[in-house]
Amino acid sequence: MRIIGTRGIEAATVRVVAAEAGVSAGAVQRCFASRAELLRFVLQHINVRFTARVAARMARQPDPADEAVGLRVVIDEMLPVDDERRLTSAATLALLAYSATEPQAAEVMRAAYTGAHTFFRRAFTEASAIGLYAVISGLQGPLIVGAITPEQAWSVVDAAIASAEKR
Amino acid sequence: MRIIGTRGIEAATVRVVAAEAGVSAGAVQRCFASRAELLRFVLQHINVRFTARVAARMARQPDPADEAVGLRVVIDEMLPVDDERRLTSAATLALLAYSATEPQAAEVMRAAYTGAHTFFRRAFTEASAIGLYAVISGLQGPLIVGAITPEQAWSVVDAAIASAEKR
DNA sequence: CCGTTTCCGATACGACTGTATCATAAAAAC
DNA sequence: GTTTTTATGATACAGTCGTATCGGAAACGG
């Protein structure tokens, strides 16, 4: 994930990953039968890592059941505003592009999308849930390349939340 | 663009591109000093091709000055609902991810974003323009991997347009 | 304590990468 | 018609790719 986020998916070779992990290439080969499997694992790992981060942050909130703050935690965790989140955003973008041409990875990605949609549907209608998630995803690109500022992104998000149809 | 959209950016090597173009690898080398330059050109080419397609379609409209239909033409051209647009969407996604780790490509991408934002700002406020474009961009991912249907995407877009702040 | 299984690092292999070089074919200039 | 560019295809090179193979270290079960 670190390699993909900082140097791109093309740099995520078996040898480079092994070196980053401080093991030999053979060890990586035993864990993953192929590079494609490794990349799929990274994709899945980013998802579980993301939900874990969200859950941890929500547990620290005064009222963990409050859906309004939960929503903001999820969004805040998705916007690439610091190095940590910028890295995972870049990696997610790379793996989404990868999924566009790799059916097996697309399957994992599709599951992640539907999972996110159902989460947002706890508080919003279907169209609003998909729309809200689309806004946040769609802000990652311009944020990463510096076309908009985090302040602009948050004002967009605020407007999107305000006009979303609650259920 | 065809190669990136169908087989991924990793398959876009000098030799493969040359073969697809029906020329030798040397010819590609003379046109582009490096592979990075070639990829940047593709990124820029997708942008000019996109605006040309939009302009052509708007010229065919009964009232080319109507901003409402213009908006829908732009959006329709961005959503990957057929093979042609799915290809450019996949290529755009790949090049966006590429831009996340390549500063020179990020510059091109940033210019494309600000161009799109100023276009949308002809009819909407800044926050709504950025938000609307984010929604459309953010729908490309779930559409490509099949997490949502084109009908769902359009209903989301309709809601986003309806709640966008016109200027 | 030894046999067995699991794991790891190293090496090997063929294929492919980006890029440099160079002879020749086509075109342009004069 | 000849000379000077320009464009092109072919080849060469060093490096990296993914993957397969294999000897020995570590962990484990008895």
Image (cartoon, coloured by chain):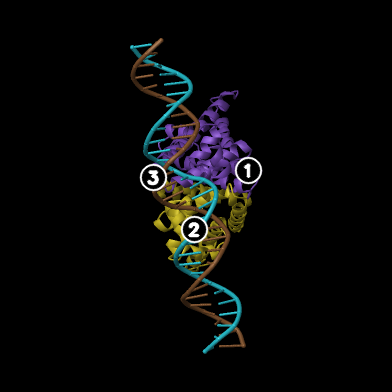
Chain colours: A yellow, B purple, C cyan, D brown
| Residue B62, image x, y percentages | 60, 23
The CA span between labels 2 and 3 is 25 Å
Q: Nearer the viewer, mark 3 or mark 1?
A: 3
Residue B145 in the image, given as x and y percentages of width and height? 61, 48
Please say whether residue B116 is visible from this viewpoint.
Answer: no
Q: Chain of mark 1?
A: B
Report x, y in % for residue B106.
Answer: 41, 43
| Figure check: B8 above or below B50 | below
> Front-most of A79 and B83?
B83
Question: Nearer the observer, disc 2 or disc 1?
Answer: 2
**Which corner quadrant of the image does residue A122 belong to?**
bottom right
Nearer mark to the viewer, of 2 and 3: 2
Name the chain under label 3: B
Tell me the SS state at disc 2.
helix
The structure residue drawn at horizontal position 40% and vertical position 36%, both measured from the top left corner, is B33
Q: Amino acid at mark 3?
A: Pro
Q: Nearer the viewer, residue A105 or D27?
A: D27
Q: Residues within 10 Å of mark 2 (few under 14, many from 20)?
A: some
Of residues B85 and B15, which is closer to you in this image? B15
> Mark 3 highlights which residue?
B103
**Spot occupied by residue A45 in the image (x, y as percentages of width and height):** 53, 61
- Quick one: label 3 or label 1, which is nearer the N terminus? 3
Residue position marked by numbered label 1 in the rendering: B155
Q: Which residue is mark 2?
A: A14
Label 3 element class:
helix
